[in-house]
Image (cartoon, rainbow, N blue to C red):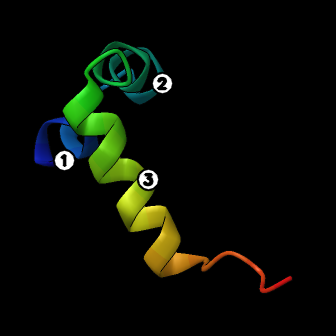
C-alpha cells in the first residue's frame, strides 16, 4: 500500500497489483469495511 501511495503513476501500478489474487482479496475486504454491502 505504501508503494502505491508513494508512486508517481498510481493508476498504472494499481492495475498491475490488481492482477494479483491476494491483493484483490485484500482490496475487496477493505472496501467491504469502508462501504458495507446493502442489506436486501
Q: Quadrant of residue 33?
A: bottom left
Q: Residue at x 44, y 53 (%)?
A: 28
Spatial separation of the CA atoms under disc 2 and disc 3? 17 Å
Q: Position of residue 12 (x, y in %)?
A: 42, 14
Q: Which mark is residue 22?
A: none
Query: Decide: marks 1, 2 in contact (CB < 8 A)?
Result: no
- Residue 9 or residue 24, whichever sits in front: 24
Q: Position of residue 14 (x, y in %)?
A: 38, 26
Q: Nearer the viewer, mark 1 or mark 3?
A: 3
Please give the residue where the numbered disc 3 appears in the rendered image: 28
Please give the residue where the numbered disc 2 appears in the rendered image: 11
Q: Quadrant of residue 9?
A: top left
Can residue 37 be seen from the camera position used here? yes
Q: Secondary structure at mark 3?
A: helix
Q: Residue at x 13, y 48 (%)?
A: 2
Please give the residue where the numbered disc 1 appears in the rendered image: 1
Which mark is first along the chain, 2 or 1?
A: 1
Amino acid at each position: 500500500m505504501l508503494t502505491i501511495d508513494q508512486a508517481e503513476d498510481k493508476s498504472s501500478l494499481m492495475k498491475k497489483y490488481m492482477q494479483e489474487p491476494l491483493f484483490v482479496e485484500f482490496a475487496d475486504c477493505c472496501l467491504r469495511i469502508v462501504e458495507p454491502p446493502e442489506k436486501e
